[in-house]
Amino acid sequence: MLIAVTGATGFVGRHLTALLARRGHRVRVMVRRPARLRALQGLSVETVPGDLRHDANALAALVRGADAIVHLVGIIVERGSATFENVHVGGTDRLLAAARDAGVRRFVHMSALGARDQAGATPYHRTKWRAEELVRASGVSHAIVRPSIISGPESAPIRTLVRLHRWSPVVPVFGDGSYATQPVWIGDVALAIALAAERPSLSGAFELGGPAVLSYREFLRAIGRASGHPRPLLQVPLPLARAGAKLLGLAGPLAPLTTDLLQMLVEGSVTRENALESSFGIRPLSFEAGLGRYLGEHRS
């Protein structure tokens, strides 16, 4: 198969592109910044320079002759014209139009656990849902995957927490830390997406989570153990955390925490309908086993 991939140089994209190549597929990727191609070094992929947001010719070149499209592009913090609306909704709309024009038969879209169009939802989750709605209404055979927080070597949030455990005498936990998460291994997510591209019978929306639900406190302690530097947890009252996140948000895209990120963290990220085993036949790797694969260098 010829599979076109957006977001190939990102966290999930790097793993997926390598996996697709190993599975014998031809892979074509869109790259906005040539310097990002280093992330795909050593892989035999066809590249199309361009920007999903405003480059119709590049989109046409990306999808021409493709058997399937995997759409991974997403942002967690807005930067300039790269808003949630422009990237999640507008970008998906333009890619679907290009797919229909080119006669592409299969479209795999990565959304997020918690995507919904409800009052009180963050702009991130609302625009992820609206992008899903565009996919559902497209008339193209599709699968939508909604992963929980993804664990892997390039996970920026987990790397930040590793550094905190290494260099800080305490690690903050917001509120009581009882809110739940279900971290899922990057290799399992990449395999599920690859299978969704290969198998049109996998149709609809699929939630992806790890094998265990952890409280945020348990999540932090697992990272501390895996890094070899477990630290005491310092409870920060939620009102104080929200005030701090509001101030940090003034730093824009460089902010380590914003009010929206804090809200999504406290909401939790758990699925009761984990499709990894039931739909994809994947036995999910545990959070601690995954951490052990890439945090060994932090042990003293």
Image (spheres, grey):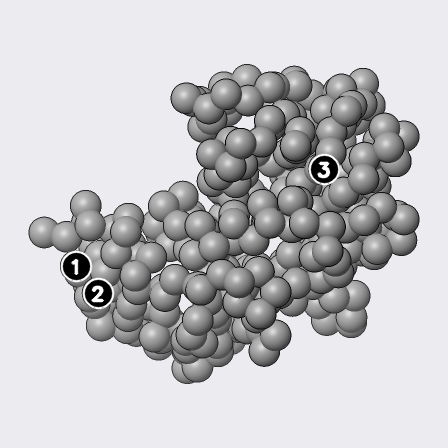
- The residue that label 1 is drawn on is 228
Residue type beneath disc 2: Arg
Quadrant of the snapshot with the N terminus: top right
On residue 225, the disc is: 2
Q: Is residue 70 above or below residue 130?
A: above
Taking 100 as reference, is 223 left or right?
A: left
Q: Image quadrant of residue 34?
A: top right
Could you tell me the amino acid type at mark 3?
A: Ala
The residue nearer to you, when weighing 297 against 185, is 185
Return the residue at label 3. Answer: 68
**Residue sitting at x 44%, y 64%:** 283
Label pair 3/2, CB-CB below 8 angstroms:
no
Q: Residue 102 vs residue 189: left or right?
A: right
Whether the residues at callouts 2 and 1 have beta carbons within 8 Å, the answer is yes
* Distance from the alpha carbon under mark 3 to that under mark 2: 41 Å
Residue extending farthest left = 300
Residue 220 in the image, given as x and y percentages of width and height: 33, 68
Lateral position of residue 185 relative to residue 223, left or right? right
C-alpha separation, residue under disc 2 versus residue under disc 1: 5 Å
Q: Give the image location of residue 44, x and y in percent.
A: 50, 21
Instruction: Sort mark 3 into few (<14), some (14-19) or many (20+) by Cα contacts within 10 Å.
Output: many
SS assignment at label 2: helix
Residue at x 45%, y 76% (from the top left corner): 213
Towards the viewer: 185 or 106: 106
Q: Residue at x 28, y 70 (%)?
A: 221
| Figure check: 138 above or below 239 | above
Q: Position of residue 230 (x, y in %)?
A: 20, 66
Identity of the amino acid at label 1?
Answer: Gly
